[in-house]
Amino acid sequence: MRRRLLAWLAVLSLLFAGTVLVAPTAAAHPYCGQAWTSLAKSDPGMSRGQLTDVRAGRHACFDRLVLDVSRPLTGWSVRYVSRVVADGSGHVVPVRGGARMEVVARVGIDPDGPLAVRPGTRLAGTAGFRTFRDVVYAGSFEGVTTVGLGVRARLPFRAFVVPGPGHGSRLVVDVGHRWCAPGHTDC
């Protein structure tokens, strides 16, 4: 009787261990290891300096937008919006794509520099990008500059500031090409 009880306990413990070991395979499968969200990200300070350049790049798992700033950037925000509006006037700025992001750097621009353009001016080419559809200047008013970013759909993203080069910094916005790894739907 005792041997039977021990045998049953051994079988039950193996079944329990098998269940615990199999459970993680049902977990989410993020695309390229990304655990990003589509929720707003920000740092609520004000910054000194000026926006000096806006550029976009393609990567294997995401498209990247970079805003170059002449000094350390301590105030910024990135979020999905239903429409992008021009700083100061509030006029809607057309931005191509299935979803729009508002990228705000709390810095001004040089009124005589290369970014002294009209709201609605395209700042970076997006031909051949998997996710980005448009990068548009939305204006600068009272030390706050906005860029509209058009993307294919509301996708996960991350935003962060990188120091340099020199005394400057860069606001980086990466938008993933998709939510899930190919072949999975539980992300």
Image (cartoon, rainbow, N blue to C red):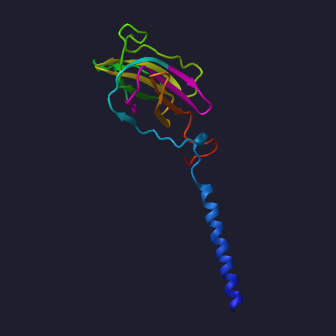
Which residue shows up at 67% across the image and 72% down it?
A: 14
Q: Quadrant of residue 129?
A: top right
Q: Is residue 11 left or right of residue 77?
A: right
Q: Is residue 26 visible?
A: yes
Q: Quadrant of residue 137?
A: top left
Residue farthest along the front direction in this orientation = 166
Q: How many marks?
A: 0
Q: What residue do we see at 63% from left, 55% from top?
A: 25
Please provide percent x and percent y for residue 11.
68, 77
Between 74 and 167, the residue placed more toward the observer is 167
Residue 72 placement, left or right of 184 = left
Residue 66: % across, % down: 49, 24
The correct choice, above or below, for 34 with respect to 9 in the image is above
- Residue 50 appears left or right of 183: left
Query: Which segment is the magenta one?
Result: 55-81
Question: Quarter of the image holding residue 8?
Answer: bottom right
Residue 115 sits inside the magenta stretch: no
In the rendered image, the quadrant that contains the N terminus is: bottom right
The residue drawn where x is 46% and y is 33% is 160
Residue 135 placement, left or right of 143: right
- Residue 154 seen in the figure: no
Give the main secondary structure of the magenta stretch. Answer: strand
Camera-nearest residue between 149 and 166: 166
Query: Was residue 64 drawn as part of the magenta stretch in this picture?
Result: yes
Q: Residue furthest bottom?
A: 1
Residue at the far top: name it.
112
| x then y, percent, for residue 123 | 47, 15
Q: Residue at x 37, y 7 (%)?
A: 112
